[in-house]
Image: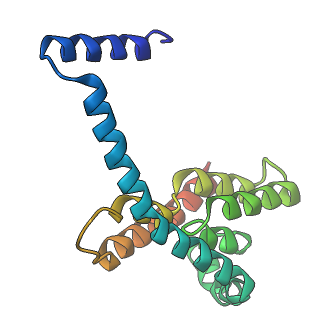
Amino acid sequence: MAAIIPVIFLVVFIVAAVRKVKIYDEFSAGIKEAGRFTLSLVPCLAAIFMMCELFEVSTLSDKLTQFLKPAFSALGIPPELTKLVLIKPFSGNGSLAYLTEIINEYGADSYISRCACVLYGSSETVFYISAVYFASLKRKNLAVPILIVLISTFLTTVIACLICKIL
């Protein structure tokens, strides 16, 4: 396995040499394009980070957590996971902090901790990933794809808690 990357490089260099491709020029062009793409991400990522911080500082996350606890409980999601479910689409580090709190409070083998671990491991920071994937698009109509991902994430959350309860 350790030889895979060197072999890939060697194959690329051999194919480039056979096709008479100027490797350094192509590499430089790729770096230039990657630089432009990275710069196009900055505004999207800055907006997401600011929104995450505002969500937490404004106590909107606490109010929303209290409001949604009964509905989550009715759907089979332990109410203790409400904040984790809400923060995961926005912040990987924030959700990791909540996951750690849950495991410390309820123990690693508890039902709640198992659900929390499955939720953390099987979902993604939707808004961060959306910013990365859609940053280079000229058309910025992201509402429908993000809504679909959020709905599917929520449905998998319900199913994951059901599976954890059965197992």
Q: From this view, report whether residue 95 is shown above or below residue 143.
A: above
* Left or right position of 158 against 7: right
Work out which residue is located at the far left of the displayed protein and give it. 19
- Which residue occupies the foreground of this view, 124 or 71? 124
Instruction: Please provide percent x and percent y for residue 137.
Output: 26, 65
Instruction: Please provide percent x and percent y for residue 167.
Output: 62, 48
Instruction: Please provide percent x and percent y for residue 40.
Output: 39, 63
Quadrant of the rendered image containing residue 115? bottom right
Work out which residue is located at the far right of the displayed protein and give it. 105
Q: From this view, report whether residue 63 is shown above or below residue 89.
A: below
Quadrant of the rendered image containing residue 72? bottom right
* Left or right position of 78 against 107: left
Residue at position x 47%, y 71% in the image: 43
Quadrant of the rendered image containing residue 53? bottom right
Residue at position x 70%, y 64% in the image: 94
Residue at position x 60%, y 71% in the image: 49
- Which residue occupies the foreground of this view, 10 or 116? 10
Q: From this view, report whether residue 144 is shown above or below residue 40.
A: below
* Left or right position of 3 against 110: left
- Which residue occupies the foreground of this view, 58 or 106? 58
Q: How many marks?
A: 0
Q: How is the image coloured?
A: rainbow
Residue at position x 33%, y 36% in the image: 28
Judge whether residue 154 can be spotted in this image: no
Instruction: Please provide percent x and percent y for residue 9.
Output: 35, 16
Judge whether residue 18 can be spotted in this image: yes
